[in-house]
Image (cartoon, coloured by chain):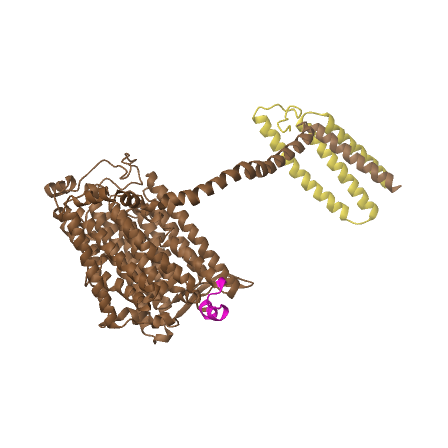
Chain colours: A brown, B yellow
Amino acid sequence: MSATTWAWLVLAFPLAGSVVTAAGFRAISARAVGIVGTGAVALAFACAIGALVALLGDPAEEQRHASHLWDLANTAGIDVKVGILVDPLSVFMALVVTGVSTLIHLYSFGYMRSDEGYHRFFSYLNFFVFSMLLLVLAGNYVLLTIGWAFVGFASYALVSFWYRRTTATKAGMKAFVVNVVGDIGLVLAAFLLLRELGTVDYEAVFELAPGAFDTGEWTITAICLLLLLGAFAKSAQLPLHTWLPDAMEGPTPVSSLIHAATMVTAGVYLIARSHTLFLLAPTAADIAAFVGVATLLVAGTIAIAVTDLKRVIAYSTMSQIGYMILGVSIGAYSAGLFHLMTHAFFKALLFMAAGSVISAMANRQDMDEMSGFGKAMKFTAITFVIGGLALAAFPGTSGFFSKDSILSFAVDRGGMYFWMAVAGYVGALLTAIYTFRMIFRVFPGEPCKEARHLIETGEVAHEPPANPHTREPEDTDVGFPGEHHHIAEQSWPMAAAMGALAFLALVGGLIQVPGVDHVLFSFLEPVFADSPLAAIHPSVGAEWIGLGVGSLVAVFGIFVTWFVYWAQPTAPAYLRERFSAVHTLLVNKWYFDEAIDLLAVRPVLAIGRFADRTFERLVVDGVVTVAVDAARGAGGAVRGAQSGFVRSYALLLVAGFAGLGLYFLLSAS
Amino acid sequence: MTTEWYIVLSALLFATGASGVLIRRSPVVILLCLELMLNAGNLALIAFSRMVGNEEGQVFALIVMVVAACEVVVGLGLIVAIFRRRLPLNVDDLRELRG
C-alpha cells in the first residue's frame, strides 16, 4: 500500500473509534469501550508505522505525497480539497501522536475505571486523536485550521469533563476562548495567503512564496505573525498561556495527552511546517524565538513557587514548549521536533505518575500535604524519578540530548542567539530545580496520612467526593471522578503504560547522539532541505561541549534542590521569608491573569455592556418593536371583518359577485 | 324552444338557492341550497352547449356534478360530526372563527 493510503487509515481508525464509542454508549459495556477506544488508536499507530515503512521505501527527494478525497470548496479563485500531505514531518508527528496516545488510552483504561462517564471519556479522547492527526496530516491551511479548531473543541470538552465542578467548566471556557483568539490568527493568515498567492495548499504555497514575497516584506511578516498568534495560543506561550495551568482541572490522562504530549505542541509543528514562510520573515521568526525564551524563563520561575502538583508540571510543559519554539524559530527544526518527541515521552510519564499520586491522595493535588510516597508506591516513585531525570536533562536520558541539540544550535548561530542559548541554560537550571523540588517533597520522608494508610492497609485512601480546590462537596450523579481511585501499583494497564514510557524517556534520546548516530535528523532532512538554516550543523565537538555544560547545569540544579529541600529542611521557609516579594510575584504567576483581566477582559466586557445599553436596546429592540406594532395594528384594522357569521360571509360573496356581474354588464353595453 | 327560457329558469333556480343560503340557519338546508345553485349552473351550461352545438358544456356539467358529490360528502360528514358532539345545528351559533 502507498504511504497516503496508510495515512488515510491512520485518520479513519480514531474517527471510527469515536463514533462507535459515542453511538454505542448504551449497548457496549465499559470494558469493551476501553478496548475499542484503545484498539482504534493502536491500529492508527500500526498504520502510521505502515506509512513510515512505505515512505522510507522512496528515495529521499521523493518523500512527499499528496492525496485528496473530495473537494471542500471549489469556486472562483479557490480550490480547497480534503487532502493530506505525507512527508517525513507529518509521518513523524503522526507516529508521536498515535504512539503516545495509545499508551495514554491504555492508562485511562485503568485510571478512569470507576468514572460514570467512561464511554464519554473514550469517545472524546478518540475524537481528539482524530483531530490532532487531521491537524498534522492536513495538506492545506484550511484543513489545518479545521483540525486546529477540532482539537480546541476536544480540549474544551475534556477540560470540562467533570462538568459538575464549576472550576472545571470555567477552566474549559477559558481554554476555549483563548484558543479561539489563536484560531482567528490562523484563519486570517490563511486568508492573506489566499489573497497574495491564490492558493492555500502547502506544496503550492511553499513553491510560490519565495518568488511572490521579498524577504522581510510587511505582508509576509504579517502572515507569519498571525500564524504565530495561533501557535502561541495553542502552545501556551506568553501572553496567551494562562489557560494551560487552569486546564489541569481535567482528568489526569487528559493533561497527559492533550496538555503535555500532543495538542500543545501543535504550535511547534505549525512553525516547522511553515518554515519556508518564516525564512522570508526573519523578524517574525526572531519574535517567536524571543517569546519562546521569555516563556521558558517565566514558566520555569513560576513552577518553582506553585504547590499544586499538576500545575507545576503544566508550567514545566510551557517552559519546555518554549525550548521547542525557540528551536524551530531559529532554524533548529529537527532539534525542536526531537525535543517535542522526547518531551512527549517524559512529560506524559510525569503526568501519569502524578495521576497515580493524586489518586492515592484521594484526588488532592497540593504538594504541601504530600510526603513519603516513595515507600507506599515504589513503581510510581521510580517512574516519576525517571521522568524527572529526563525532564531535568540528566546526562544520558532522552531530554538531555534533545534539549542540548537546540541550545548548541543556538550557540552555533552566535550573536543574539548565543544569549538565547544562555537563557536556555538558565531555564535548564530552573527545570532541574522545580522537577526535583516535586520529587523531594512527594516521595521521600515521613509518610503522610494517605501514604501511611496505603502502607498499612494496602488500600487507596478514600474521602467523600469534593472539589480538590474549593473543597466543596460534590454532586455524585455523573461528571465527577468516581468513588474509587486507581494507582499504578494496583492496575496493570496504568503500570504497563508508565513502564513503556519510562523506557522511552530513558533511551529515546539515543536515536540522535552527536557524533554517534543521527536517525531522526536524516529522516527529517528532506522536509527542511529548502532552508539554508538547516544546513548549519554545530560541529560534534561543540555539541559535546554543550552536552557537558548541560549535564553540569542539571547536576548542579539537582544538587541545589537536594540541599534546599532535603538536607536543610528549614531552607525553603527561610528563602520564602527572605525573598517574600519575589515569592509573592511567583505564587501569583507574575500577575499575568490579573493583567489580562485588566487589559483585555474588562475592556471587552465594558464594550459589551455599552453596546447592550445603546445599540442593542435602542436600535435593535427599536426596529423589532416598530415592526411588531405595525403588524399588530394592521391586523386589528381588518379583524372586524372576521365576524364568524357564515351567512354574513355568504352575503358578502353574493354581493361581491353581483357587483362584479353588474360592472361587466354595464361596461359591455 | 329558445335558449332564453332555460337561462331564465337557471337564473331563478340560482337566485332561489342563493337566497336560501343567506336566509336559512340549518346547515343541512344550506347544503341543499348550495346543491340548487350548482345545478342551476349545470342547467345553464347544458343550455349554452346545445345553443353552440358542441359537447364542452356537457363535460363541464359532468365535472360540476363530481365536485358537488364531493362537496356533499364533506358537508354531510361535517354535519354528522357537529351532531355527534351535540353542538347546536345552527350556523349562527357556530362562530368560533370570529377574529
Q: Nearer the viewer, residue A300 or A248?
A: A300
The answer to which of A612 and A99 lies nearer the viewer is A612
Residue A405 picture quarter: bottom left
Name the residue rendered at 49%, 38% in the picture: A609
As drawn, A132 above or below B71: below
Considering every residue shown, the one lying at the far right of the view is: A669
A472 vs A11: above or below: above
In the image, A576 versus B26, the foreground residue is A576
Q: Which residues fall within the magenta stretch?
A: A204-219
Q: Residue A264: x percent and y percent?
A: 34, 55
Residue A437 left/right relative to A286: left
Is the C terminus of chain A in the top left, top right, bottom left or bottom right quadrant? top right
Across and down, in percent, residue A60 comes to: 34, 75
**Image position of B10 (left or right of A66):** right
Residue name at image x 80 percent, y 32 percent:
B12
- Observer-nearest residue: A355 or A185? A185
Q: Is residue A25 at least partly visible in the picture?
A: no
Rendered position, B41 above or below A62: above
Q: Can you see residue A524?
A: yes
Furthest residue toward front: A578
On whether residue A611 falls in the magenta region, the answer is: no
Residue drawn at (31%, 62%) of the image: A419
Quarter containing the N terminus of chain A: bottom left
Q: Position of residue A557 (x, y in %)?
A: 20, 55
Can you give x and y, in whole percent of width and height, for residue A648 in the image? 71, 28
Image quadrant where residue A168 sits: top left
Q: Give the prevailing secondary structure in the magenta stretch.
A: helix
Q: Quick check: is A210 in the magenta stretch?
A: yes
